[in-house]
Image: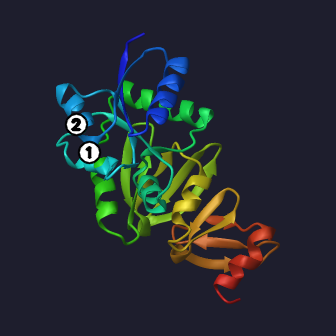
Amino acid sequence: MPQITTLIVDDELQSRSLIKKLLLDNFPQFIVEEAESVNSAKEKIDQGQPDLVFLDVQMRGETGFDLLDQIDKVNFRIIFTTAHSEFALKAFRYSALDYLMKPIDTEEFKSAVSKALVQIRNQQSPKEQIQFLKEVRSNQKTPDRITIPTAEGFLLVAIKDILYCHAVGNYTEFHLLNRPKIVSSYTLGYYDEILSGHQFFRVHRSYLVNLLHIKMYKRGDGGTIVMNDGGEIEISRNNKEAFLKLFKI
């Protein structure tokens, strides 16, 4: 089994020790280094970029983003760790970068690391995701694009071009305007959290629709909506009343 190098960047010794223990207990192929500040992390990365970095968002007098701003080419995968900052969480979701909330849950930790290992093996570069993250952070307005992870990598898609999202097991199909559909490895619930502020509505447990792309509503038990691409989607009885209120019906 090939060895994987990782760097844990956190100003708290207890946090670094916990991440290191979780890593070595569950992923013995990791070689672990630690850094307690942006400067020490930058020095270690300059000596040779690791495969994976655990990066704390908020440290004493500095942030994990300060480290990213000092690195021209980010060729390592990143798992952010944070105890707060709703804006940071929103930025991670839009850019599809992994993060762990403190206190760290063991199962979520193993899931995030397993996903990172797949990305490392597939040599998926996070460069464009990091750039998009920086754009989201520098612009306090709600982003108008979203990063969609796929089996091959990821795509940046304009939110206005999303017709609707369809849950297929633990995957999500994106049906787009004038483009082939995209299958994402994230759940519909994940995208519901992101898109609910963009004129999207969960008409059914399996469907999240862009209200701006609805062409017609047909009455019925729950009712059916016809999208601009001709697709027909049933509205669940539980969601019918809330849906009709949106259109003041």
Please name whichever residue, 53 or 176, is drawn nearer the observer in this view of the structure. Answer: 53
Q: Residue at x 33, y 47 (%)?
A: 64
Disc 2, disc 1: CB below 8 Å? yes
Please name whichever residue, 239 or 234, is drawn nearer the observer in this view of the structure. Answer: 239
Query: Which type of secondary structure does the marked residue at label 2 adopt?
Result: helix
Query: Which type of secondary structure does the marked residue at label 1 adopt?
Result: helix
Circle 2 residues within 10 Å: few <14, some 14–19, many ≥20:
some
Image quadrant assignment for residue 203? bottom right
- Tell me if 173 is positioned left or right of 88 in this view: right
Q: Residue at x 59, y 48 (%)?
A: 187
Q: Amino acid at mark 2?
A: Lys
- Tell me if 204 is positioned left or right of 5 in this view: right
What residue did someone put label 1 on? 67
Which of the image's four quarters has the C terminus? bottom right
Q: Position of residue 51 (x, y in %)?
A: 33, 27
Q: Could one spot residue 80 in this view of the protein?
A: yes
**CA distance for labels 2 and 1:** 7 Å
Q: Amino acid at mark 1?
A: Leu
Q: Earlier in the sequence, mark 2 or mark 1?
A: 2
Please name whichever residue, 206 or 120, is drawn nearer the observer in this view of the structure. Answer: 120
What residue did someone put label 2 on? 42
- Tell me if 183 is positioned left or right of 202 in this view: left
Image quadrant assignment for residue 32? top left
Circle 1 residues within 10 Å: few <14, some 14–19, many ≥20:
some
Q: Position of residue 50 (x, y in %)?
A: 29, 27
Image quadrant assignment for residue 143? bottom left
